[in-house]
Amino acid sequence: MIVAKKKLIKEIMAGLEGRQRVLIVACGSCVTVCLSGGEKQAQELASQLRLAARAVGKELTVDVDCMERQCDREFTSQLTHDPKDYDAVLSIACGVGVGFMSELFPASRVLPGLNTTFYGASTADGVWGEYCHGCGDCVLALTGGVCPIARCSKNLVNGPCGGTTKDGKCEVTAEMDCGWHLIYERMKAAGRLEELRALPVQEPRDWAKDRSSGARRLVHKELTSPEDR
């Protein structure tokens, strides 16, 4: 799932400067699960924005709407308010939702209410950890399911650097596990250390699969019409 956290109220208010009517659009998918962008959080944010406006002698009309997924065109029919009726639309989806809403409603000023952080999983109640970087060139089959791109602070794919501490932590910060220590322990627990020792040297990463080739697309031709490919 995509994990995100709420922007500071002062940052959101700065983006809303000069706006009088605001529509907050929640997303019922990933950001609801990580307790950042669901309908409940939208209602709370609406109250906070009204109070922040009154504190500086202004009135701000804030309405709330919700879509099951802001990254999917078919769910725009769930909107009960028309974005064109507002000075700004504050999306509390991930950055994908903000970008897609901006494309669907080009006449509207669509602003982000969250900071998108990573692809993660729930590791404990109220805790989410990063497990994937979305690099486009997955090596999890070689590393016991531990991603060296997401879990190593230096994105190393051919083993650890010389900065790993004795207790398996990263030199960058004492709280961070060394990604390659995690890989070693995972492979050891699975009885696969010989596979790890036999790994060939990985070629330099093809960054065109990540970011350098521009915005990436996934197209299932059997599901699309020729003009959409």
Image (spheres, rainbow, N blue to C red):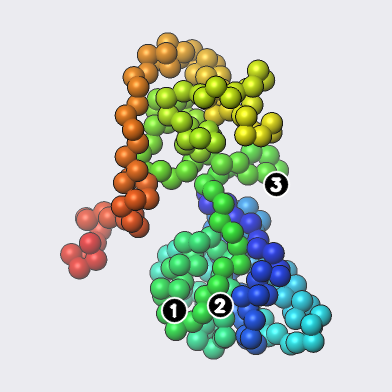
Q: Earlier in the sequence, mark 1 or mark 3?
A: 1
- Nearer the observer: mark 1 or 3; the answer is 1
Image label count: 3
Q: CA distance from mark 1 to mark 3?
A: 34 Å
Q: Label 2, on which residue?
A: 89
Question: In which quarter of the view is residue 14 placed?
Answer: bottom right
Callout 2 amino acid: Val
> Residue shown at 64%/86% (left/top)?
18
Image position of 203 (left or right of 3)? left
Q: Between 61 and 152, which is closer to the camera in this rendering?
A: 152
Callout 1 amino acid: Phe
Q: Label 3, on which residue?
A: 126
Q: Earlier in the sequence, mark 2 or mark 1?
A: 2
Position in image of residue 196 (x %, y %): 43, 17
Q: Label 1, on which residue?
A: 105
Callout 2 secondary element: strand
Asked if residue 193 is positioned above or below residue 110 in the image, the reply reads above
